[in-house]
Amino acid sequence: MKLSNNIKSFLKGETLCFPGMYPLTLIMGDGGLLCGKCALENKRLILQAHATSKIYGKHDRWFPKNVDVFWEGDIRCDYCSENVTAYGEI
Ligand SMILES: [Zn+2]
């Protein structure tokens, strides 16, 4: 299975949605949510979980399920517990 293009570009650091500059988040196999910073920091684990999903399934916490746009509200990253904001912002 190939990585979808939106997950691929997310892991390359394109963690903002155009137009609008809304932050993108990564939805994980266990239903968790990763902010751009954590996704990039744990890229290796994410790519590994994807590569081994045939064996270990798609419910691993590091399996990249989908990229979602975070529009507004209060959502925290399940890894760093930070509020999800545009990557690079305070
Ligand atoms: Zn995070």
Image (tube, rainbow, N blue to C red):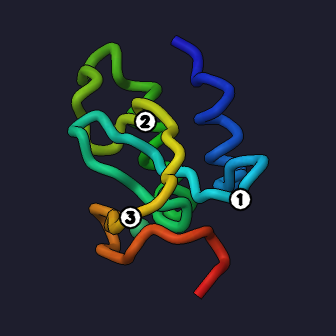
Nearest the camera: 4 or 17?
Answer: 17
Q: Is residue 72 above or below residue 12?
A: below
Image mark for residue 21 = 1
Using residue 33 as the reference point, say whether residue 46 is left or right of it: right
Residue drawn at point x = 58 percent, y = 16 percent = 2
Q: Earlier in the sequence, mark 1 or mark 3?
A: 1
Q: Tell how many labels.
A: 3
- The three-letter code of the residue at mark 1 reads Met
Q: Earlier in the sequence, mark 3 or mark 2?
A: 2
- The three-letter code of the residue at mark 3 reads Gly
Mark 2 residue CB less than 8 A from any atom of ligand 1: no
The residue at the far bottom in this view is 90
* Element on which disc 3 rests: loop
Q: Nearer the viewer, mark 1 or mark 3?
A: 3
* Element on which disc 2 rests: strand
State the separation of the CA atoms marked 1 and 3: 15 Å
State the separation of the CA atoms marked 3 and 2: 23 Å
Q: Is residue 87 above or below residue 22?
A: below
Label 1 neighbour load within 10 Å: few <14, some 14-19, many 20+: some
Label 3 neighbour load within 10 Å: few <14, some 14-19, many 20+: few
From the image, tell me which residue sits under label 3. 73
Q: Earlier in the sequence, mark 2 or mark 1?
A: 1
From the image, tell me which residue sits under label 2. 64
Using residue 6 as the reference point, say whether residue 20 is left or right of it: right
Q: Find ligand 1 in the image and state its quadrant.
A: bottom left
